[in-house]
Image: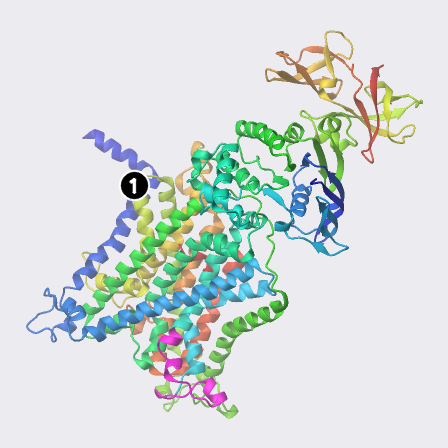
Amino acid sequence: MPEIILKDVTKKFGEVFAVKNLNLTIEDRDFVTLLGPSGCGKTTTLRMISGLETPTEGEISIDGKIVFSSEQQINLPPDKRNIGLLFQNYALWPHMTVYQNIAFGLENLKWKKEEIQNRVQQMGELVKISELMERYPAELSGGQQQRVAIARTLAPNPKVLLMDEPLSNLDAKLRMEMRVELKRLHVEIKSTFVYVTHDQLEAMTLATKICLINEGVLNQYDTPLLIYDDPVNRFVGDFIGNPSMNFLEMKIEKINEDSCSLKNDEMNFKMNFRAKSGEYTNGQEVYLGIRPEDIQLTESDKNTSTIYSALPSGMETIVKVKLKDVILSVVAFGRVDFPVDTKIGLAFNTSNYHVFNKETSQKIATGDLEMF
Amino acid sequence: MTKIFNKTRIFFQKPENVILIVLLIILIYLTIIPLFSIAGDTFTVHSSEARRIRGSEVGDLTLYHWNYVFLSRASENLFYKPLFNTILVSLSTCAFALIVGGLFAWLITRTNLRFKKVISTLMLFPYIMPSWTLAMAWLNFFKNSNIGGAPGLFTAITGIPTPNWFAFGFFPIVIVLGLHYAPFAYILIGGILRNMDANLEEAAVILKTSRFKIIRKITIPIVMPAVLSTFLLVFSSSMSAFAVPAFLGAPVRFQVLTTQMFRTLNGVNPGVGYIIASLMIIIGTLILTINQIIIGKRKGFTTVTGKSSNISLVNLGKVRTVVSSVLLFILIAISVLPLLTFTLQSFLVEPGNYSLDNYSTIFWTGEGSPDIASGEPGILKNKYVYKGLTNSFMLSLAVAFIAGTVGILVGYAVAKNRGKRSSNFLDRLAFFPYLIPSMAFGAIYLSMFSVQRGIIPSLYGTFAILILVGSVKYLPFASRAGINAILQLGKEIEEAAVIFGVGWWKRMVRIIIPIQKPTFISGYLLPFISSMRELSLYILLVTPSTSILTTMLFQYNEKGWDQYANAIVLLIILIVLTFNFIINKVTGASIDKGIGG
């Protein structure tokens, strides 16, 4: 059962922390994405799992076997870890044909010639490149190179497949196609996938679990929908979702057991708690986080605001509205459009509104809103 | 008729077209026509040959030279043996340079060697210094008294006389040229290794490939084009080297093609020299054309660049410190010791006598006495040395100014007319002088301009011919820089100014040149340094009144006035290093980066 466990893994480059005290358990047959802005340490994490990078401290085990431990002085080289690694730039060897690229790893494992032939054939069919076997990488399109790289990585049948932004060099349409293929592949070959990306949409659509990293620190590790619906701090709420969450600066007042009021110069809400996760005091400064789809556009004259701009894309329309002096993002579903500068009412009818501590950015509470 | 006239008028309204046509005409005159001239000279009776070719008069057509070079009884010693020597020297130099340079490149980029920074800086030293400095240093150390003259430092210290094969001829020539070009191999191979996507090797590591197999199956095949290209460049450079074989080979009459060319052109049989020059031009052009094709193919080898992160380095383990120290020691010996010997030698009154009372500054500041070197004053008091120094400076400044400026214009005309046949032709034409061995290039100018040509009077013996030959020879450096700079800039930057009606001159001076200043500056400075240390290009064309530092060095050395020669070497090295340092600081360019097409 290839389970990957990272315990207190830290990586320092000079004095800079690339990864700080990372604890992570990736279970068998998970499809985990390491997500975060560029430079957050996600690629470093992946390379530490692969063995290409050596952690400064901590312990990593794969499939019950410790592959790295700073305490026990264990550091298995990459080839002893039974992993596959897919590079962002594919790293196909330019002087070898597609066939030679795929067969190379099998030759190292001293497979028999017919076995290699069969396996390469099989891989070619799996990623649909059978007719390209005699070509050189330079003669392939980006998408084809990508497929060859996948075939090369999968050929030795690694128990764990590590991928470093494998789709970022493809165009939008191809990327969509490859996502579909990857998700199918994950089910077909029954391995554990660890996937690095900075694209939150990619992470959401592919993963069984997302590991969100910021500045070397793990922020949240949950299923995509939980991360979306229940962000633990402001960073997570902000990073996930497009268009991003609206944040309103407020003061918390009149605290009761199950409700409070949120106020600023222009607005005044009452929040009924659905869940509470932190301490707060009267008069404390907070952010109220509202997802764009949790605001409804209405015909009523409640919360009348002005259409600042509307961006229809067919399936949905992203609307920027101006409520008093604040600009909010709203998503209106369906084939609708709104002329600029017309008046429209707003409603807050769901119960997915979050309050974040302004100082620590941790989430304090979730609940529904009533407007005064 | 008016239609054609109008078309022509519109064509010439664009400044890039005017520049293109003017440059094409000038460069054809300065690079293509001379080839015909030199070819003609191989069939002509020259004034010094009238007596040896019976019944001929100066200017007659003759096959005598060709016959003499290839089919006569003298051919063996005149041509075939030097040709064989040249090929042997060049091949051995290539092997030596590639092994040393490649090994250093691999150690620096792929292992945990110590002192990497110092080593990679020192490594460039032998290349920045003119090749003949190491040859002089070799003589200072290892010459013996078999040939006449004083023994070198090695014999003086150890008492062991060096054998002839070690002191002169093939062996030291290969060592010196090899050391001179090893940095070149180091730069090219190291560059590829450094830029080569580390992922390519990591991908193999993940697929359980052994260290050795990675080098054999991945690394070497990928650096192969660079190795091949280095091989060809080093081969053609060592083939055209003159000073090193002249210094080290002459004492034992070890002749190569360049020394033969110099002897015959300067002696009684210029026709033979022109034939050798022509052959070298053909070989040189051929080799470097092959190289261009290889480089062109290499494009197919570049892969999508990703984050080439720090590759895991080979751990040298126990030998790490030992290997690092030995390498450092060798490099210091190669780069610093020569300078010490030059200094030492220039203070010795009697060469070969290293006792303390034999030191004196007479060769630096002496007034000159009749019993030493025909009364030649010390080099700081010597008006000829000052004249040579001034000449060298003036020449290099003029060459740099012309080559640099024309280089920018070539860059502009080529980049703006990109894709047109005329633009490709100009590009090739401006690069052509690079393909021709220096001394052969001097020879074709000797042939072209030693007589009156139309309105151009005979230029032989004038300063103008030196400036001309230098400017054309170093144009490739400047035009490469110019073309890259303007291509990189893109059309839009200039078009934005055209929209506002800004004139061409102002566009150049206010927009294009300021933006790409560093590149253009290196287009001026590289020709300057190269010209400053050049010997073989100018040596056929200088006369006593136009002599420059390097040719004076050559003459002092021929006369056996070691102290003067060493003092001048020191002077030239000082100038070259100072300017290379300045360039490096100002623009980040360096002579070691400008070469290699």
Q: Residue at x 41, y 61 (%)?
A: B528
- The reply, left or right, for residue A250 in relation to residue B215 is right
Q: Quadrant of residue B248?
A: bottom left
Is residue B461 something that shows in the picture? yes
Disc 1 packing (10 Å; few <14; some 14–19; many ≥20): few
Q: Quadrant of residue B397?
A: bottom left
**B172 within the magenta span:** yes
Q: Residue at x 51, y 56 (%)?
A: B215
Which quadrant holds the N terminus of chain A? top right
Question: In this picture, is B524 found above or below A370?
Answer: below
Q: Secondary structure at mark 1?
A: helix
Question: In this picture, is A304 found above or below B304?
Answer: above
Which quadrant holds the C terminus of chain A? top right
Number of numbered markers: 1
Is residue B587 something that shows in the picture? no
Q: Which residue in the protein does label 1 denote?
A: B421
Residue B200: % across, % down:
53, 48
The amino acid at mark 1 is Arg
Is A173 in front, or is A363?
A173
Q: Which residues are magenta?
A: B145-173
Question: In this picture, is A192 found above or below B44?
Answer: above
**B118 within the magenta span:** no
Q: Residue furthest top?
A: A300
Residue A104: % across, % down:
50, 47
Residue A68: % across, % down:
71, 51
For the rendered model, the colour scheme is: rainbow
- What chain does badge 1 belong to? B
